[in-house]
Image (tube, coloured by chain):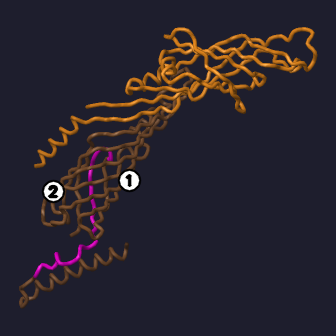
Chain colours: A brown, B orange
Amino acid sequence: MIRRIVLGAAMALALATSSVALADDDEHPYRPDISSSLSTPFRLGFGLDVGVPSGAALGLAINPKLDWLRLQLSVTYALAPGGRVSLQLDPMALAPHCPVGLFGDVQAGFVGQGSVPGHSADLPSAGYDYVNLYGGLRLGAPNGFHWNFEVGPTYAHVATSNFQVVAKGNSSGLTIGNPTANGWIIPTFVTGFTVVWP
Amino acid sequence: MKFLLVGLLVSASMAACVSAHVDEPSVCSTQPIDFGPAPTIPAGVLPSQSVAVTLPPTSVTFDMSGPLGSVGDVASNLQATINELTIDKANLGWVSHVDVQIQGSATDGSTPLVELGSADSSLVVHVALSPVFVLHYLQSGLVTLSLTVSGNVLSDSAPSGEITSSMTLCASASGDVSKHL
């Protein structure tokens, strides 16, 4: 992995250097665009987005030598810190200069147990795992800055803890277990930008 | 373009729906039982002779309608089961039979909860009620369990004094949530 990153960075540096060298040479005004003839490099980038149920997310974007495939690993924060893996299939990225694209995105993530700030002692906390099945609209070239709008259904497993506090003050001596819920939320969304170094 | 997208998102949110299955794994309550004074052994019984003893009937009440009602407020197709119904056998190690009848606040008559098992520290009452009836009873409010215990004791180790114990009732509930916003 690290070798590929270094190789990709070296290739990018070599391209930039040769381009500058040609530009400085008055005897060679012809500067062909050779980037499209090269195999797709390993691209890296980052993304920032907000949505439901993932909350705010900051992630590392990876195009593993396939521009139409993007893996994004994010740290998230909703009620509590969490994480998310996103696999985007963007066939329109095969036309890299097209500023608009439609893509599919499968996201899986979790949010740790968290409670309403300041009420951890008197309210139950909740955490959840989720899978988002999104369709998305990309505004901007795939290899560069682009803004994404994604919407679709979410399947979530919600677990609670500290639910006993709801029986506080109840004199009947009830012990209440922590409820769980599994189900679909339709629709949910995420929107934000991704920057991929071309 | 962005306004259109925001509009679409808002419209989609307005038509949002949630469809989920909710589980409350356990609502438990432990209540004391007082069987009153131990019965006296009839005169003339030989030492170490086995004597049949039946304690006076007693009852214990539970109220789980609050938590179950809360689940019922958000869920449909509610189902409830009794996961655990046990009697602490610290003072009742000699008991071999328990007759338990359940009666709810809004129900007619009482229904037996059958069979008796035994764990290390408790007498286990196996509940033969269907989830529909369990829900019927537990949602009605105060539930009264009437107990009659009996067994055989040796005459020289018969229980004496006030016989007390405790009973634990644990129930679970589940239901479906379907909300359109």
Q: Residues within 10 Å of mark 2 (few under 14, many from 20)?
A: some
The kind of secondary structure element at disc 2 is strand
Residue at 61%, 24% (x, y): give it. Answer: B30
Most foreground residue, A193 or B77 = B77
Q: Which residue is mark 1?
A: A83
Circle on res. A139: 2
On the rendered structure, is A163 left or right of B53? left
Q: Amino acid at mark 1?
A: Gly
Rendered location of residue A158, percent (x, y): 41, 40
Q: Which residues are magenta?
A: A32-54
Q: CA distance from mark 2 to mark 1?
A: 25 Å
Q: Is circle 2 on the same chain as circle 1?
A: yes
Q: Please indicate whether residue A105 sits to the left or right of residue A156 in the image.
A: left
Circle 1 — which element? strand
Question: x%, y% of residue B112?
Answer: 61, 16
Chain ID at mark 1? A
- Is A175 positioned to the left or the right of A78 in the image? right
Q: Is residue B35 magenta?
A: no
Identify whether A17 is placed above or below B75: below
